[in-house]
């Protein structure tokens, strides 16, 4: 599912809201998650999972085209850990 499909599905299920209102809600939701992670926080959605960040150390990488070594700086990357309910539903037989 892509963002526009999510917005359309939410708009279809909430006829009292306009498409523009649903789009603003979805934008706000994603923006808040990003801002919390950027501030070093954690976002937990019970039954779904938790978003956090992890630190990656600086390292020496390699350009696959030329084989030349290049420095890769340290950075924070997003990480998602699925919740128990999601894991159970994905592995139900």
Image (cartoon, rainbow, N blue to C red):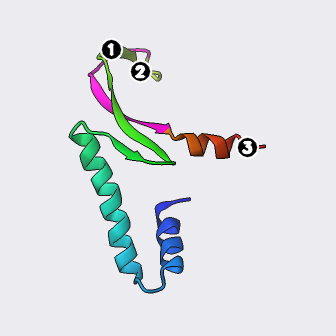
What residue do we see at 34% from left, 59% from top? Answer: 29
- What is the C-alpha distance between the residues marked 2 and 1? 13 Å
Q: Is residue 75 left or right of residue 14?
A: left
Q: Is residue 63 above or below residue 51?
A: above
Disc 1 versus disc 3: nearer the observer: 3
- The quadrant holding residue 38 is top left
- What is the C-alpha distance between the residues marked 1 and 3? 40 Å
Disc 2 versus disc 3: nearer the observer: 3
Place of residue 68 in the rendered image (x, y in percent of width and height, measured from the top left): 38, 15
Mark 2, Cα crowd under 10 Å, few <14 / some 14-19 / many 20+, is: few
- The quadrant holding residue 90 is top right
Which residue is at the front of the view, 6 or 62? Answer: 6
Residue occupied by mark 3: 92
Asked if the stretch drawn in magenta spans residue 53, the answer is: no
Q: Note whether residue 62 is visible.
A: yes
Residue at the extreme right of the image, as rendered: 93
- The quadrant holding residue 58 is top left
Disc 2 versus disc 1: nearer the observer: 1
Q: Is residue 13 above or below residue 2?
A: below
Q: Secondary structure at mark 2?
A: loop
Residue occupied by mark 2: 63
1 or 3: tag closer to the N-terminus? 1
Residue occupied by mark 1: 59
2 or 3: tag closer to the N-terminus? 2
Name the main secondary structure of what is drawn in magenta: strand
* Range covered by the magenta-colored residues: 67-81
């Amino acid at each position: 599912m892509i963002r526009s499909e999510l917005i359309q599905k939410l708009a279809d299920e909430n006829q009292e809201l306009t498409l523009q209102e649903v789009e603003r809600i979805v934008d706000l939701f994603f923006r808040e998650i990003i801002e919390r992670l950027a501030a070093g926080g954690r976002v937990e959605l019970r039954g779904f999972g938790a978003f956090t960040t992890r630190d990656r150390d600086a390292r020496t990488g390699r350009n696959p085209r030329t084989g030349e070594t290049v420095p890769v700086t340290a950075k924070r990357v997003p990480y998602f850990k699925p919740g128990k309910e999601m894991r159970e539903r994905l592995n139900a037989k």
